[in-house]
Image (cartoon, helix red, strand yellow):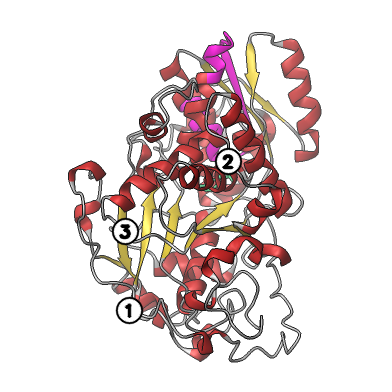
Amino acid sequence: MIALQNHLPRLRVPWVPIGRWPTPLTALDLERSETEGGDPDGSTRGARGSAPCRIERSEAAGGDPYDSPGAAWGRAPRGIERSETEGGDPDGSTRGARGRVPRGIERSEAAAEAPDRSAGGAGGRLPRGIHRSETGAGDPDGSAGGAGARGPRGLAGAPVWVKHEGDAHPEYGGNKVRTLEVWLGHARAVGARRIWAIGAYGSNHAVATVLHAPRAGLEGAAIVFPQPISAWAVENCRALIASGCPLIRLRSVIGVPLAAWRVARRERDAVVMPPGGATAIGTFGALAAAFELADQIAAGLAPPPRRIVLAVGSTCTAAGLVAGLELARAIGLWRWPVPIVHGVRVTPWPVTSRVRTAELARRTLVRVERLGGPPVAIGLAGLIGRLVIDGRELGPGYGRSTPQCDAAMRALHGPECPRLDAVYSGKAAAALLRLHRAGVGPLLFWASKSSATLRAPADEVLRNAPPAIARWLRRAEDR
Ligand SMILES: Cc1ncc(COP(=O)(O)O)c(C=O)c1O
């Protein structure tokens, strides 16, 4: 929120400082991983594991953007301004002349890309939402599976940039720290004593809430429902139990609305956040992140991205970024073409519907104006056009990994790489690699998983778990 305050000091948003801002912005060389891109079953695992990604500009890490004005960002990504003749779909057998939209990419995503479209010229044969000038291979949204056969194109050797949101806090970082700073500010402003998060057993949002709420003088609490077992879910769930926070366990996600309503009615001095904190309160965290990013780009830490790639679960972060980029543009802070926010769906439609996400961005901008900020002249259609919702990595559903996700996690594995998880950021990384292989760039990866791993609590602590959660944890151990 600091960046937002710096640029719009009259905007009155209550918040509680928790994170370390700005989060680092660095470049990663994907040279190796992209040549191994078509390896969903991991047959080249050895090579990838031995030489993972490499940071090209470590000086950016943790730096203050104001300390390094005008710094160069290393080599310019090769192939970004490729000719429009490369825009077609070389193997586009499934799309054909009618230019059908690749599966998982919603249709009208190109709507607001007009400013960058001048090179378009004939045709509309590109998958929608893909700029001619940003494509090397022409099919970034349609190449998840068999890209290896085609080999790397376009941005071969070019880095991608990474916003290390995981570094937001040494104890527990990730994208939810930003969301929480504003929610905690709101809870304090309304005189609450306790703040409830809602999520799956292994919810990052719930863990962040119970660990950070005390910093605001509040008690964190969680309403949780089952999810598929995974190492990341288990790590978080154990930490949740170990925190000793008030916990309500639901049999299924279906019970969420009623449980939230009951708690809100019973506890007049509590705030109940919806899953992921996704309201026009929570979005202000990511909105401020767009301002922070603008400062870092202005300071030369990275080129203005063409796409920002991130996991979309509750839509809070993606909507906040879309709104923040527009707001930053409106006040002249974002002075480059506005990037597409490329949301990689990790929860199903309609939770992550593009219209719903854009509508949350719109409500965020309405709230900005109500709080004394400038009006932003963009409607819902325009906001929809700033957003891609990419469903190709969801696989069998929330919390279940996919071969592409596993491959991306192997590819982006190493001390310099952001920590990934197979619930959220691994799926986003799979889309990132696909886009990179297709020559889209510059790409910015929003690395949203906490860099800090939570310590496993002692077994006796876990005896306090509600019986159903204890059974779930035992099943995880037996695996
Ligand atoms: C690690 C991680 N990445 C991405 C997301 C998605 O963010 P959002 O819920 O704001 O869409 C979440 C949500 O909890 C998350 O925990």
* Depth check, front residue: 198 or 431: 431
Label 2 Cα neighbours within 10 Å, binned few <14 / some 14-19 / many ≥20: some
Label 2 vs 1, first from the N-terminus: 1
Q: Which mark is residue 376?
A: 2
x, y percent for residue 256 = 76, 32
What residue does disc 1 label? 157
x, y percent for residue 408 = 47, 68
- Pointer 1 residue Cβ closer than 8 Å to ligand 1: no
Q: Is mark 2 on a helix, strand or loop?
A: loop
Residue at the (56%, 27%) spot, across then down: 463
Marks 3 and 2 sit apart, C-alpha to C-alpha, by 26 Å
Amino acid tagged 2: Val
Marks 1 and 3 sit apart, C-alpha to C-alpha, by 16 Å
Image quarter in which the C terminus is found = bottom right
Label 1 vs 3, first from the N-terminus: 1
Residue at the (58%, 30%) spot, across then down: 369
* Depth check, front residue: 191 or 379: 379
Residue at the (55%, 54%) spot, across then down: 311
Answer left or right for 157 relative to 371: left
Amino acid tagged 3: Ala
What residue range appears in magenta?
186-211
Q: In this view, does 267 lie above or below 155?
A: above
